[in-house]
Image: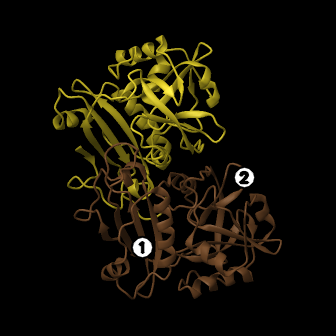
Chain colours: A yellow, B brown
Amino acid sequence: MTLVPIAGLIDGRLDPRDRGVAYGDGVFETMRWTGGRIPLLQWHLARLAGGVGRLGIRLPDLSGLEAAIADATPVAGDAVVRLVVTRGVGPRGYAPPRDALATAFALIEPWLPRRTADPEGLVLRWCQLRLAPQPALAGIKHLNRLEQVLARAEWDDPTIDEGLLCDPSGHVVCATAANLFAVIDGRLVTPDVSRVGVAGVARAIVRDALDVEVRSLPSAELDRATEVFLTNAVRGVMRVARIDARRFAPGPVARAAAEALARNGLVGEAVR
Amino acid sequence: MTLVPIAGLIDGRLDPRDRGVAYGDGVFETMRWTGGRIPLLQWHLARLAGGVGRLGIRLPDLSGLEAAIADATPVAGDAVVRLVVTRGVGPRGYAPPRDALATAFALIEPWLPRRTADPEGLVLRWCQLRLAPQPALAGIKHLNRLEQVLARAEWDDPTIDEGLLCDPSGHVVCATAANLFAVIDGRLVTPDVSRVGVAGVARAIVRDALDVEVRSLPSAELDRATEVFLTNAVRGVMRVARIDARRFAPGPVARAAAEALARNGLVGEAVR
């Protein structure tokens, strides 16, 4: 991984008093670098600004981000950029200091196409862990991610690509690192994330482009879905071939979603 | 603050790839240093071991902790020691690497007695934020603390000492940085933390010493409490003088709890 320091690091290292490590007091964005730029940068920056606004974190100057990444990365190669913004260093105690200066840095690594075990698309499992609804944090891509860590630790079978997560009522929310879409009764549906889950950038673009119903989605409804796909801002649209034993055939809606992302500059996995 | 590096730091700084800052993937203990030692150390280490065990983090060697703190701290002075253990550096992605080496460090600052605005004890308010029940993380003193940060950000009136937090059902769980006890109908009660909240070290000692009922506690029941007090491992027993307008008189149970902590070496705030 290549580090691009932006604010608050010293010699490329983090102060151990940083509230990012003390409390997970910050946000992040995981972004695709391609063709010498971050095609979805404006979407990422808008979500980041929303997140730091809700947490009361002062947004650092990120205007030089793409230039700094270009300096650190071969322009020709595709990369994944993880941008982290924390509240910065503060005294001990939960009370957020008003005058803290945010810490910001990016970590860059090469982007590689996902190699799925099933050529038709992703293979998914159901995670046992239930995501806890917390409206005060829902939608924000914050640094409190132990639920995702525990969910992802539930399996290490390399033939399983992702895990689906429900809330305590058995409504499906998302995968560990992607949003979920399904075509049910002829309508494209994505779970509501106003109480739990992350409001993904790719999800927002698909919502802008297509007619999407945003609602609570009981997990059993996926049984009668005709198409299921995941989205994130690094891999774009990822067609789901299977959830456990249930198979889903390729369809036109995932292709339309992938085209919407491609129009915004994000060419993801091949979607047949 | 004085830093005591234990494992994984380089020149006293944290690797930006550390999963502590990436995901809040770790645990901490806030401990009182007094008389040249941490009197509750064995309790803290037991809880820490439980937390890292549930998260699958490899516990680093902490056998030299008190000696390292003694080297860094004037023996005569009282101090607060914040011990942080993270899963360490790993590749991008939620999947916890099996071979990660934990990062560990302590931050030390002087301990000062709390100056409360009300000489009778703490003044508390009710926080608006509701804690989200998550059984997979309940009890653990993990680094995902944005709920506490947001709750503590609800007030900056210096005459208010702490805030009480409820779960979504209106059951009181704890204060932002302390556990709660109340004497209700002649019985000492503390909220159950098996679904939400932190299982405090001072709380465990009080439970060992006194007859304590552990149960769900509807917030309205505090209206008829005859004594209310908070506990943590830095300040011991903290008598509550007021919750909003409701006053509580001093009583014998808080004193008995303070004596139980004193027998274990933790002399906290004065409890009349």
Name the residue carrying label 1.
B81
Q: Which mark is residue B170?
A: 2
Q: Residue at x 27, y 61 (%)?
A: B13
Q: Residue at x 59, y 82 (%)?
A: B261
- Residue B265 seen in the current view: yes
Q: Residue at x 65, y 78 (%)?
A: B208
> Which tag, 1 or 2, sits closer to the chain's start?
1
In-front residue for pair B243/B171: B171
Q: Is residue B256 above or below residue A211?
A: below
Q: Position of residue A130 (x, y in %)?
A: 58, 43
Residue type at mark 2 is Gly
Q: Is residue A91 above or below residue A192?
A: below
Q: Where is the N terminus of chain A found, in terms of image quarters?
A: top left
**10 Å neighbourhood of mark 1: few (<14), some, or many (≥20)?**
many
In the image as oriented, which residue stretches furthest toward the top? A252
CB atoms of marks 1 and 2 within 8 Å = no
Q: Is residue A190 above or below residue A58?
A: above
Q: Where is the C terminus of chain A found, in terms of image quarters?
A: top left
A98 relative position to A243: left or right: left
Q: Disc 1 and disc 2: Cα gap in Å?
A: 33 Å
Q: Position of residue A257 (x, y in %)?
A: 44, 17
In-front residue for pair B40/A124: A124
Q: Position of residue A86 (x, y in %)?
A: 38, 49
In-front residue for pair A38/B205: B205
Q: Chain of mark 1?
A: B
- Residue A100 seen in the current view: no
Residue type at mark 1 is Val
**10 Å neighbourhood of mark 2: few (<14), some, or many (≥20)?**
some
Q: Chain of mark 2?
A: B
B179 relative position to A65: left or right: right
In-front residue for pair A176/A59: A176
